[in-house]
Amino acid sequence: MATAENKKDGYILRCFSCKTEYNVDDYGKFYRCAKCGNLLEVKRIPAAPGRFNRRRGLRPGVWKYFDLIPLWSEEKIVSLAEGGTTLFDCRNLATIFGIRSLFVKFEGLNPTGSFKDRGMTVGVSKAFELNYKSAMCASTGNTSASLAAYSAKAGMRCIVLVPKGKIAMGKMAQAIAYGAEIYQVDGNFDDSLRVASEICERDNKILLLNSLNPFRIEGQKTVSFEIVEQLGGTVPDFVVLPVGNGGNITAAWKGFSEIFEGGLEGTVGNHLGKNPPKMIAVQAQGAAPIARAFRSGLRDSIEFVSNPQTEASAINIGSPVSWMKALAAIYDSGGLADFVSDEEIFAAQKLIASKEGIFVEPASATPIAYLSKIAGEKSDAYEQMKDACVVCICTGNGLKDPNALLKGVSLERLQTISAEAKSLETVLA
């Protein structure tokens, strides 16, 4: 078992672009590389065999992988029993799409109903370890709910900025219930994140906990470890997931990549597969800067969307902060990126619910919408995927944003019967 000191020796903070290195525990004093201004990442230095061993008796879920996460003290863990979400074998959808093997990793089963909890347990735990008393985020909803919950657990002050009128009320209700200080910004998510970043950079006593925070990524990467373990060691051929700010695909790719690194003896290193999966990024058509950059063959540049428009509010982001990391994950994995329309998203949301009993929020339905799209087109991507093992990561619970699905539905339009069995028999006949 690693001590805190030699565990520290196994991690560095590094610029994703120019590779300048920093001390991991200096994060929060700065948020970007001092040399080139790019995003930072936590880099694990493969250690001697046995240093990083999963401690099975510690906790389930995310913290089962404590030795693969840059937190030094178990006493600083702030947890709500996140992770360990179900991997559903979706045979009905597989038949509909003509895909040999289709699974859905349903992250809506996390404590606050979204994948954000994986990253937030690590982000808040690290903030707690570094003695921060306040945390802040900009959010389209899920991040605010998650940060508010974990801040409440840690006894920290939570400050949330949301784009005015562009957050699902189910998510707003969560942040209110958990006691967050909520401020509406007269602008979109990108404006909210800009304001939050400026405040946290000026005041080193408030830690920014958006997905540019590399400790968030360290928690979210555990979804990849779980997928491989739940498949009995099989590494899927393709992983399809929704993309907004770019943090989730960055994290999933980091997790799969680490599985193939050295120093993981006795952990998720016991896998079946020669290569990590191909990562498929799916965006909404009205907010698809990453997909359009990929379609244009771009890797080191991107054209942002100044006024993103999609009813899948969780991915209504036009200036994704992690765009470079997301594109790297797509290119390095041999994957691809595409977009789907809002109409395709809502059709897919109903399809996965009616055929598999899984109710996801609109943004989470984008992987299903994408599979439906390529199956109908019989595209080259479909030809590659139809005989493969495909995993879709559905990131949030449908109860977070039910209003989108209920548009046009009125209780007055539902058929009413008398309180007699005979009345129902007549209707059913």
Image (spheres, rainbow, N blue to C red):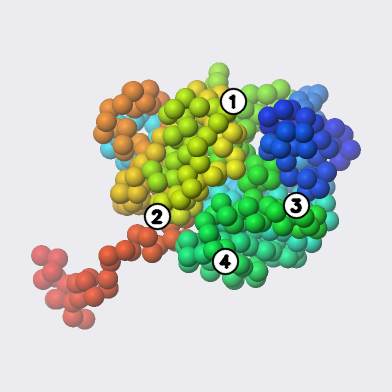
Residue beneath disc 1: 271
Neighbour tally class for label 4: few under 14, some 14-19, many 20 plus, Cα within 10 Å: some
Residue at 22 percent across and 71 percent down: it is 414
Mark before the other along the chain sequence, 4 or 2: 4
Neighbour tally class for label 2: few under 14, some 14-19, many 20 plus, Cα within 10 Å: some
Q: Which mark is residue 201?
A: 3
Mark before the other along the chain sequence, 3 or 1: 3
Q: Quadrant of the N terminus?
A: top right
Q: Nearer the viewer, mark 2 or mark 1?
A: 2
Mark before the other along the chain sequence, 2 or 1: 1
Asked whether the beta carbons under mark 2 and mark 3 sit within 8 Å of each other, the answer is no
Asked whether the beta carbons under mark 2 and mark 1 sit within 8 Å of each other, the answer is no
Q: Quadrant of the C terminus?
A: bottom left
Tell me the amino acid under the disc marked 1.
Answer: His
Residue 348, placed above or below residue 371: below
In three-dimensional space, the C-alpha distance between marks 2 and 1, rounded to whole angstroms, equals 39 Å
Residue at 40 percent across and 51 percent down: it is 310
Q: Nearer the viewer, mark 3 or mark 1?
A: 3
Question: Residue 8, position in %: x, y?
Answer: 84, 37
Tell me the amino acid under the disc marked 4.
Answer: Gln
Neighbour tally class for label 1: few under 14, some 14-19, many 20 plus, Cα within 10 Å: some
Residue beneath disc 2: 311
Mark before the other along the chain sequence, 1 or 4: 4
Mark before the other along the chain sequence, 4 or 3: 4
Q: Which mark is residue 397?
A: none
Residue beneath disc 4: 184
Tell me the amino acid under the disc marked 2.
Answer: Glu
